[in-house]
Amino acid sequence: MEPVLQAAELTKRFASVAAVQDVTFSLAPGQVLGCLGPNGSGKSTTVKMLTGLLEPSRGKVLFCGENIQKDLVGYRKQLGYVPEEPNLYPYLTGREYLEMVGLLRGMNSGRLGRKIDALLGLFAMHPHRHSPIGSYSKGMRQRILLIAALMDDPHLLIFDEPLSGLDVTSALVLKNLIKALGQHGKTIFYCSHVLEVVQQVCSHLLILRKGVVVAYGTTEEIHNDLHHSSLERTFMNLVEEVDTEKTAENIITVMETN
Amino acid sequence: MTHDEPQSAPRPFIRLVRLFLDRTFHGGDESGAGELDLSLGLVLSLLALPGALYSTLLFEKYSTLLLWMRGQHNFDPVAATVPDEYFFIVLSTVVTGAVAVWRWDSIFPDRRDYVNLVPLPISTKVIFLANLTAILCLAGVLAVDVNAASALLYPLAASSGQETFRYVAQIAGMHVLTVLLASVFSFLAVFATVGVLMAALPYIVFRRISIYLRSLIIVALVSLLSTSFAVPSMIGNLPQTWIRFLPTVWFLGLSQLLHGSANPALAKLGSLSWKGLGFLFFTALAGYSMSYRTYFARIPEAAAVISGVRRESVSWLFPLFDRMLLRTPFERAGYRYAIKTLFRSEHHSLVVAGFSALAIVIASQVLFAALSGGELNVGGFPSAEVLSVPLILAYSILLGLRLAFEIPVDLQANWIFRLLAVKRSSECIPLVRKIMLTFVIPWLVAFATPIYAYLWGWAIAGFHVLIVTLLSLVLAQILLVGYRKVPFTCSYPPFRDSAIVTVLSCVLGYFVFVVFISELECRALLNPLYVVPLILIGPAAWYVTSVFGETIADVDKQIIFDDSTPAPFELLDLEQRS
């Protein structure tokens, strides 16, 4: 199957420091690629290059075989993106924000209104649709971002920590939704710190450390290759150099010191 | 035990006062992004600048040498100080009031303060007192800063002909006390208004009316500024005129009372200033205490999400514009976004309200001057002054909007425009032009046309509205030369280098757009030959801006989201290129 999204030797340098170096992967329709890595591993930079917000210093992002930089507007029409931070305009209401995003995406206003109302209802946001976003909790803002990403039925979805701030029910809905989207042929790039969720929803894994890919393959392959009992162990083995149990003990010691 | 921390850590109360003061000066934005990053020193200097400039100009007025050279041998220095003293009182009131309105939201502790401070081992009484202390300190700092330069320079200027130190000290003492009290009065008036309204109204209602109230106060302050030249000449007829209701006149009375030169009516008003100050102080204190109890202490009980109701009454408006005016999806989304920002973001509303207030004040003065001079000439031809009124309004509103577009709002939220919006300025400028004209054409058609038609007939009304519309379009085009932003989504421009040139251009533009055009139009009504240059001005200006636009390099036509000064040097990164 022809890949929908490909990253070819993606590299981003800030001054002389390489934030991301030679990241290469491909995603076919229906695949859900989980991107893991500790803070500073280059996940956000990779996501920004995949969305076209940052131009790579070297390498390219291909969408259906075409470099996205050739037609960014066309590419973004096919892209749904949930950023890490729910930065929204606080004085717009939830519905107004979604209406604005829908219009920017060029959606027909009749279709847009119907979709917004239906999705607001499904994400339990309908009662708050006319309230200003400034008064929303983080979880509510996150739900607005999710609706904004999904409502135009994009082929490619890029989620950066989409569960952040969501309540248990919404998180469960989203986990099932990601699996279902994959089954419906959508291509998903999923960035997260929550290993259990990645293990549950992702068919493939990409693990970054200091801007470099340290593991890439199907979730089973990575498990099998490293012979660890859980993804947590695999992750710790690949990216962390910290003895977490020892660190926890040290914190307690400092707390208890007079 | 280690002792790395400083031995004399500030007490919680003092630290809290500092926190509230810092918050007031640095804004209440969650991220701080989008705030104009001016240092405290620069803010204080800017506030002190008008007083310093005016005081400096007064040295010329009171110079004994210049008076002698002009032949003004009967110059009465005491009488001459009345208009200047009044001007300083007005300036002090307006600047302090404007700053208090600008920082309206930061005066009271909010939900964020509650979340951060109440869980700490500090009683709410301490938080209350610390915030109150911070407010009083702020009032003091503002009063001193706004009047600092004039307190030093004005007494020196006004006592040029007097050699006794006693006279200089008397003028200085009188002046300093009056302007400081006027500043405090202005601050307390705003503070009392906020406190009483917060105490009396449900918080949601208060938030809704807050923006309109602030705009109204700005209009009142600008109108007050316009009284500074008219009031001194009306002091003789004080009991019969409306000016006795102006608090600034009460403080002029106080100043004259202290000087020992007040007439009975002015002396009576002078004593009213003390009563007014006392009344405001206790009202502000009571309002603040009550609002603290009704709002701050009940934050956890209040619903976190403000309930909202869709206003169906105007929901037909945007679809109508979609069909008639807005052609692309970007224009439709951008238009809604910009209009809502201008009406709901308090900083943007205040800028537009300030420019509109200035326009109304100037237009009223021009109109009143024309009416008092008997220049209305109903049925004949309107004078240039009368014709200039819509031009003044259009010029100020368009200028205010242009400035408001430069003020960013929540820069971190602009990612959606980076992701989905247009790439070239040529796609954005038509949208911005339509937004600008939305604020001019409706009132021009709804109000100006019927008034001009009623007074001078439909032909003159139609001609005048056509000229104002055409020239507003041209002015919008000129103001947008080099503009390459989606409104409110880009960081502040590096204005420091060009601020003076920009202000001078605006003043010059006023004379061309308002004075010159209205004069030309007036002549065109009397002599049809003048219609030709009047009509040609529009297309000529449009052509020049278009030609200039074409000379801009292609790279400078890309939409930007970060308006920073160009780097002094560029890294060639030859290693990568090779």
Image (tube, coloured by chain):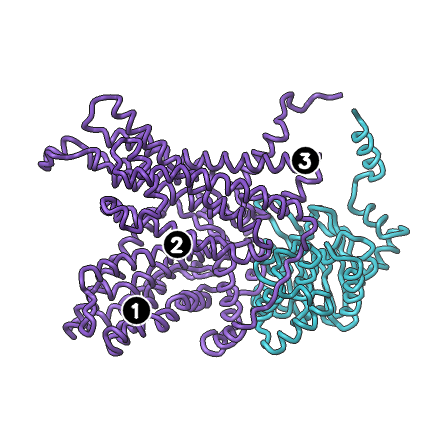
Q: Which chain is purple?
A: B
| Residue ID for mark 2 | B219
Report the chain holding disc 3.
Answer: B
Around disc 1, counting alpha carbons within 10 Å, would you say few (fewer than 14), some (14 to 19), or many (20 or more)? many
Q: Are marks 1 and 3 in contact (CB under 8 Å)?
A: no
Query: Quadrant location of residue B152?
Result: top left
Q: CA distance from mark 2 to mark 1?
A: 24 Å
* Label 3 SS: loop
Relative side of B559 to B544, left or right: right
Q: How many marks?
A: 3
| Residue ID for mark 1 | B468
Mark 2 belongs to which amino acid?
Answer: Val
* Chain A drawn colour: cyan
Viewport quadrant of the N terminus of chain B? top right
Report the chain holding disc 2.
Answer: B
Relative side of A148 to B63, left or right: right
Give above or below for B434 relative to B64. below
Q: Nearer the viewer, residue B109 or B545?
A: B109
Around disc 2, counting alpha carbons within 10 Å, would you say few (fewer than 14), some (14 to 19), or many (20 or more)? many
* Label 2 SS: helix
Mark 3 belongs to which amino acid?
Answer: Ser
Tell me the number on the disc at residue B123. 3
